[in-house]
Amino acid sequence: MNAPFLISQTAEQSGYGSDYYKVVRGLTEAEIEAARAGTPVYFRADRSSRGALDTNWRTVRVHGKQTFPRVPKADAVTMLRKQTGLL
């Protein structure tokens, strides 16, 4: 992954698992604009994704005015774990 990226210190996920609404709250305007422009914006959720990656890292997807959490791809999770030292 050679593209620049951001790690949000203020973002938090609302809604998990089978919850109908899952959104990201607490993003700054700069982080929202970066995600809208295609720059990866990552944050740590309160809960693990379980499954194959078993990670707390999430990436932000912007659709209109809404921001949605997604589990990043395996190479992004590996890169984030190496750079931050956090699972």
Image (cartoon, rainbow, N blue to C red):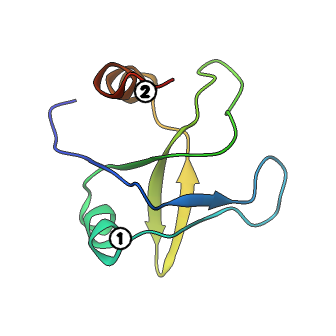
Residue at image location 84% in from the left, 51% down from the top: 18
Q: Secondary structure at mark 1?
A: helix
Name the side, left or right, on which 55 lies relative to 26: right
Q: Which of pointers 1 and 2 lies earlier in the amino acid sequence?
A: 1
**What residue sits right under mark 2 in the picture?**
77
Depicted 69 relative to depicted 24: above or below: above
Furthest residue to the bottom?
65
Q: Quadrant of residue 55?
A: top right
Tell me, yes or no, whether the two marked residues, 1 and 2, touch with CB atoms within 8 Å: no
Depicted 57 relative to depicted 69: above or below: above
Residue 84, position in %: x, y? 34, 28
Residue 12, position in %: x, y? 57, 59
Q: Quadrant of residue 46?
A: top right
Spatial separation of the CA atoms under disc 1 and disc 2: 20 Å
Q: Residues within 10 Å of mark 2 (few under 14, many from 20)?
A: many
Name the side, left or right, on which 82 lies relative to 19: left
